[in-house]
Image (cartoon, helix red, strand yellow):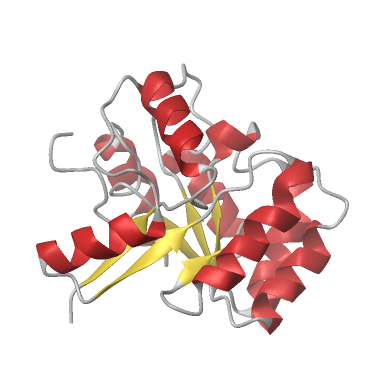
Amino acid sequence: MLIDFHTHVFHDKLAPHAMESLSEKAGLPPLTDGTLSFTERLMRAQGADDFVALNIVTTPHSEKKVNDFAIATNAAHPAFGSVHPLSENALAELGRLAAAGVKGVKFHHEYQNFFADDERAFPLYEKIEELGLVAVFHGGADPGFAPPWKASPERCARVIGAFPRMKLVVAHLGGLLMAAGALTFLKNTPVYIDTAYMAGA
């Protein structure tokens, strides 16, 4: 079975603006229109049996709506929710996601504007570990942001050192444009990596 573990989809009403904004920020043309239906067609055409939709909460006030969409999407395809460390409801949202059958949460520390090893996020990581959820970090650089990168391999290693039972995936081979750092700091750790967006990196 072939599963694309790292995709992003948006509600049909939000997709056009989201794709335009992301494309402009990153300076990259989009491959899809960002909708679930388009992604389903693309996956079938590419021979994938299924895909995981990784949702990202960029501000505390968007947390519930993003997770409502993740829960709804999860009925058809595996979908991860997201929480924000500045949200008063983040811990409760993690419980809600787990109760709804969502298997994990995505963090993109650049868009969420906090460092991976910021201790304000530690209660979230502790709860994720307790619930047995999977955490996915955008690892390394992002073309839409300037350094210092908020989820460098070194910072991700500090997180897994503090929460060794947390199931952590550091995307983009452990750190986009940071292969040397990934080899230095993430080898011999229990983190997983994915290969998203690495063909031309």
Q: Which residue is drawn at 74% across and 74% down?
A: 96
Q: Residue at x 11, y 62 (%)?
A: 46
Residue that sits furthest to the front in the current view: 13
**Vertical relation: 109 (above or below) 106:** above
186 relative position to 179: left or right: right
Q: Which residue is drawn at 33% across and 43% down?
A: 33
**Vertical relation: 131 (above or below) 187:** below
Q: Work out whether residue 165 can be spotted.
A: no
**Vertical relation: 97 (above or below) 144:** below
Q: Which residue is drawn at 30% across and 55% down?
A: 38
148 relative position to 174: left or right: right
Query: Where residue 92 appears, x then y in whole percent?
Result: 82, 67
Quadrant the N terminus occupies: bottom left
**In terms of depth relative to the viewer, which is nearer, 177 or 14?**
14
**In terms of depth relative to the viewer, which is nearer, 164 or 69?**
69
**In terms of depth relative to the viewer, which is nearer, 171 or 27?**
27
Query: Where residue 21 appears, x then y in whole percent?
Result: 47, 26
140 relative position to 102: left or right: left
Among the 4 quarters of the image, the one containing residue 89: bottom right
Among the 4 quarters of the image, the one containing residue 123: bottom right
Q: Work out whether residue 91 can be spotted.
A: yes
Query: Where residue 35 appears, x then y in whole percent?
Result: 40, 52
Quadrant the C terminus occupies: top left
Residue that sits furthest to the right in the current view: 88
Q: How many marks?
A: 0
Query: Where residue 75 appears, x then y in whole percent?
Result: 50, 80
